[in-house]
Image: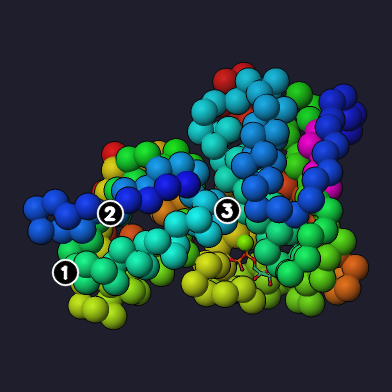
């Protein structure tokens, strides 16, 4: 699993690629935190375009990033979510906490 | 109940084997001609069960995970995951949504809920100090 950060239109885009399971989440969590701490963004977008698979470890990652942003007064959006990750997101109910957009 | 077709695979509880276990079950399930959604559901549930063995059953050590899949009556896939790890004190409590004994930064407490809603039927047998077996069944009706 890979993650990269880029500022576009005033927002920090965190682009993820790969399979977001417990193994993948471990690989990107520290970098996600580092990128956020470096930019201290007001708006952050997690781009799920290249996330082909996600399980509940991905839910924990999203919630963790959301909390980190909350602590610095930032807001999180999750975008380009494919069918399988979307089903996991819906089952978890985190749509009530984080703004989620389907692919 | 006739068991025509099964596989058994054992592997160490390394997180790099999560993807292997999903793909392995998906490959086996392919002979039931599942829809893409059914296949995704099975992979998601397997990922949850295997992750639980890695994270919870064998914390701070590498143990063995035993995975068995079989096909029942040409339309149901059964996947069982067995570990000989720490076991679960209170299975009903563990199955409650949002319940986790793990690090809340890494775990969402949604594993069992997802297994149930994505597979249909989930049985959990566990003995503290002895280990846990999770048996999941999904009946496929997508194509046939
Ligand atoms: N194989 C296992 N061995 C020991 N404990 C387990 C096992 N599977 C699940 N558990 C327990 O059940 C709880 C809930 O599991 P789950 O719903 O998957 O949530 P999570 O993995 O996010 O904690 C875990 O936190 C753990 O205490
Ligand atoms: Mg779990």
Regarding mark 3 in the picture, which secondary structure is present there?
Answer: helix
State the residue in front, B111 or A38: A38
**How busy is the neighbourhood of tag 1: few (under 14 within 10 Å), some, or many (20 plus)?**
some
Q: Position of residue B143 (x, y in %)?
A: 57, 20
Q: What is the CA distance from the residue labelled 2 to the residue labelled 1?
A: 14 Å
Magenta segment? B66-70
Q: Is residue A13 magenta?
A: no
Q: What is the CA distance from the residue labelled 1 to the residue labelled 3?
A: 29 Å
Give the mark nearer the N terminus: 2 vs 1: 2
- Residue A75 occupies quadrant: bottom left
Which residue was labeled with disc 1? Answer: A42
Q: Residue at x 24, y 78 (%)?
A: A72
Q: Position of residue B131 (x, y in %)?
A: 86, 64
Which residue was labeled with disc 2? Answer: A5
Q: Residue at x 54, y 26 (%)?
A: B35
State the residue in front, A28 or A68: A28
Q: Position of residue B102 (x, y in %)?
A: 61, 73
């Amino acid at each position: 699993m890979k993650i990269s950060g880029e500022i576009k239109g005033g927002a920090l885009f965190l682009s993820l690629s790969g399979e977001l399971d417990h193994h993948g989440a471990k690989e990107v969590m520290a970098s996600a935190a580092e990128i956020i701490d470096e930019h201290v963004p007001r708006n952050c977008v997690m781009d799920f375009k290249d996330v082909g698979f996600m399980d509940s470890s991905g839910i924990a990652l999203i919630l963790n990033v959301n909390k980190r942003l909350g602590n610095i007064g930032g807001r999180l959006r999750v975008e380009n979510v494919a069918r399988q990750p979307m089903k996991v997101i819906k089952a978890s109910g985190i749509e009530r906490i984080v703004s989620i957009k389907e692919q | 109940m006739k068991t025509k077709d099964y596989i058994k695979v054992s592997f160490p509880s390394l997180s790099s084997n999560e993807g292997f276990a999903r793909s392995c079950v998906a490959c086996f399930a392919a002979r039931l001609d599942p829809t893409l959604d059914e296949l995704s559901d099975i992979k998601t549930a397997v990922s949850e069960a295997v992750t639980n063995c890695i994270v919870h059953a064998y914390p701070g050590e590498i143990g063995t995970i035993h995975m068995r899949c079989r096909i029942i009556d040409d339309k149901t896939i059964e996947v069982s995951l067995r570990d000989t790890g720490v076991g679960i004190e209170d299975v009903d409590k563990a199955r409650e949504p949002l319940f986790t004994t793990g690090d809340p930064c890494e775990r969402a407490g949604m594993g069992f809920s997802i297994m149930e809603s994505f597979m249909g039927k989930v049985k959990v047998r566990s003995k503290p100090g002895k280990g846990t077996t999770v048996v999941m069944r999904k009946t496929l009706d997508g194509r046939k």
